[in-house]
Amino acid sequence: MYRIGVDVGGTNTDAVVIEGKTILAAAKSPTTEDVMTGVIDSLKKVIDETGLDKSKVSAVMIGTTHFTNAVVERRHLSKTAAVRLCLPAAQCLPPMVDWPEDIRDEVGNIYWMAKGGYEFDGREISGLDEDELTGIAREIGEKGIKSVAVCSVFSPVNDDMERKAMEIMAKVLPEADFTLSSEIGRLGILERENAAIMNASLRELSHKTVGAFARALESVGLTCPYFITQNDGTLMSTEFVQSYPVLTFASGPTNSMRGASFLSGEQNAIVVDVGGTSTDVGALIKGFPRPASTTVDVGGVRTNFRMPDVYSIALGGGTKIQTDPLKIGPQSVGYRIFEEGLLFGGNQLTTTDVAVGLGLADIGDAAPAKALGEETLTEIKAEIDQMILNAVERMRVSPDPIPVLAVGGGSILIPDMVGDLPVIRPEHFAVANAVGAAIGQISGEVDRIFSLDGLTREEALAAARKEATDKAIAAGAKPESIELLDQEDVPLAYLPGNATRIRLKVVGDLDG
Amino acid sequence: MDPLRKIELEDMEAISLGGAFLGTGGGGDPYIGKLMAEQAIRDSGPVDVIDVDTLDDDALVVPVAMMGAPTVMLEKLPRGTEAIAALEALQLSLGRKADAIFCIEAGGLNSTIPIAVAASVGLPIVDGDGMGRAFPELQMVSMTMHGISACPMVISDEKGNALALNTVDNLSTEKFARVITVEMGGAALIALYPMTGAEAKRAILRGSMSLIHSIGTIINSEQRANRNPAIALADKLNGVRLFEGRVKDVQRATQGGFARGTCQIEGLGPFEGEDLTLRFQNEFLLAETDSGPRAMTPDLICLLDLENGQPITTEQIRYGFRVIVFALPADPQWRTEAGIDLVGPRYFGYDFDYRPLEALNQ
């Protein structure tokens, strides 16, 4: 059986066909405004290339930056109602208080604060008021709003009130989509609520996009199930992505890192993805990217849902170099390297010229770079190597000598050794993203505060693991394939009763 | 350093950054307090910052602060009226109105919350604080050394509860208030250490608001110029760049309600071949090498990102971070015998006699 991975990037839409551990075909097509056409083009290419029996394709996995771009460009966002369950607490900073004005206007800046919410230990701040919520739901209906984000204080500790509030409001608004913050974000109400509101504003686009993907597959004759990849490299069903489009936000770098892991066979490594203008460095732990522990800005909005920890530096294949005094970047000629780079007859010395001048790559004309002299070139390369080394060292998780995986169009810049770490250059590195999509697994995750009064740490961890496993099975994982991917418990300062925050994630193979 | 005379909306960015720096690794993210202060300034106008010497000797100065776990406050945001309610209850029991607001902690979340209160109630804020940095307990302020009682103190929550405390000493205030804080949900707002103008002139650490603002301004402008702020900070603040290196190990444990731990840093550049160990309990409290301590509490130990100069907290720090360890001399008040008793290395369980930063790095 075959799997097809598709990566819908800002510039290119890539597709790969894999069977087991083998890449059978890979293709690139330009991404199109309607998304669908680009997907059809690249799918047709790989299918034609292999003469594939379409009935033997078990699944198609799609990675997309479509929803991230919608937020960044403030396009296709729906008017959304935010309902925060908190009173009398949390009135000082209303929902969307820290959003840039343009996106706040786009989403409507429509919110209510209502009774509800919990304390850190699960006590109620105040009980839900059914009449209050019914009234709010009526007002939402009168405004013609179809998407509602519900966020209760300490919902990561207990999500009951968010669910109950949704049930009450859904009686008045049977057609509306509801997004519950507890299903998306972590502790930190503003960031979690921001993510929930953004998600709600993307629901309509998500329905349309999923429909477009379905039609694309249908038009090339693929009838198998298809999935969308999420931030942590695992898969979402189409129903799921219609409900949680924000979970795709960082799937691009994640797929690239996961693809690099698959192509090289390395589970623990540092991945260095060198593009035209920048280099992204991330850490792989057991084949998955290490998540960022701090807040992440998306289109100027602070969020805290799980994103891979990626460190970016302004160093790419097109990065401009000044020689006297030596200065590398941060500007880059980008895709204009074919006009401006010395090796293509231009006037700008770039990092690629240096690589070509030193004989590390054979493209264009090496002569203009060679004219700088071996000594100068070596000196510049040493500086480039140092930049890469610093970025790699920053992302390293332990003193263990794990390999560095070099991917991306500019990866010739990466030396054979980065400090004491050996570099591996996997085949098919240019379509690592689509490969990463093709190999997606199903996950289940828990992140909340446990009180260790009357519960040992081990019992708390076991309870968390059971909860995560149940979530993974509900999402479509084969029960026997489920394993623990990541677990972390952080004791909380100042709180008695041994309050501890447990984050835990399990993954399993897709059933079928 | 120019004194800060007014806090406008656009000053909050720098104040929040300076507050993170003076948090010396702890104190909580000033972000929520910054948003609250911005909101209050937008609604009620800028806040006047006054020199303590301009206060009448019989004026009433009241510090306000948040107490408890910053992690809780980032989830259960305040109602917004708690600190004002605490202030009003305190005024009622004292039978008079406050003339100025004061900030007890220059680092972390508490560097920004009093500004929000001052804007809302239309009072000026005194250019000073009680710590010159962040410390974890409420008796750890210069006022304690001057015999000023934390009480009467009022602690209040979003439901409208406002409890007045009258205790025998400031350490007892800390103990009782900590219990109440938990009952109030893990974080609460407080008004305490009511002082006369004369007492404030004697007891407070001066110029803290100006200092926070100028630290934030330096970090901001150096970052914009693509320079590491550590050089300019060392120059302007009489500080020491103790060490540069890469974090090679972080160990954490919770003991007695505090996040304790150690962080080992392996030298880079001029420090290659040396190691430095940081010890922390919410805040960074001790920096030592093989040859002995290099900086200790109450002197300030701040960790900055080697790349961009951003302050790093004890919660964020982890393996692989490239950092600058930066130390600043504490206010002279902390370097007295009374100060060392209150916040010196032994109070935190480190077996060292306090020696000033300058003596350790001659």
Image (spheres, coloured by chain):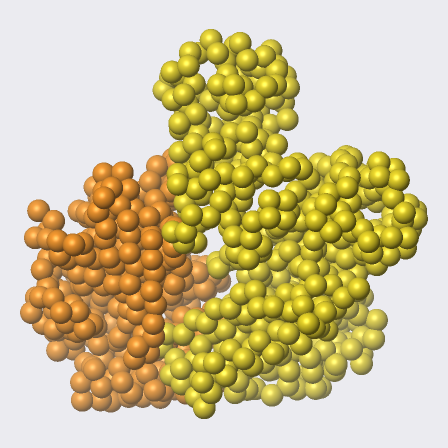
Chain colours: A yellow, B orange
Q: Nearer the viewer, residue B248 or B207?
A: B248
Q: Is residue A75 visible?
A: no
Identify whether A330 is placed above or below A133: above
Q: Name the spot of residue B331 as percent of width and height, x first.
A: 15, 59
Taking the image as shown, residue A359 lies to the left or right of residue A10, namely left
- The image quadrant that residue A152 belongs to is bottom right
Q: Residue at x 64, y 82 (%)?
A: A161
Q: Nearer the viewer, residue A435 or A384?
A: A435
Q: Name the spot of residue A383 as percent of width and height, x first.
A: 40, 28
Q: Name the spot of residue B86 as percent of width and height, x first.
A: 36, 80
Q: Nearer the viewer, residue B354 or B260?
A: B260
Q: Is residue B302 visible?
A: yes
Q: Name the spot of residue A507 as percent of width and height, x first.
A: 63, 65
Q: Residue at x 80, y 79 (%)?
A: A172
Taking the image as shown, residue A397 lies to the left or right of residue B333, namely right
Q: Nearer the viewer, residue B14 or A282?
A: A282
Taking the image as shown, residue A68 lies to the left or right of residue A305, namely right
Identify whether A346 is placed above or below B215: above
- The image quadrant that residue A185 belongs to is bottom right
Q: Residue at x 84, y 71 (%)?
A: A175
Taking the image as shown, residue A490 lies to the left or right of residue A287, namely left
Q: Residue at x 53, y 85 (%)?
A: A122
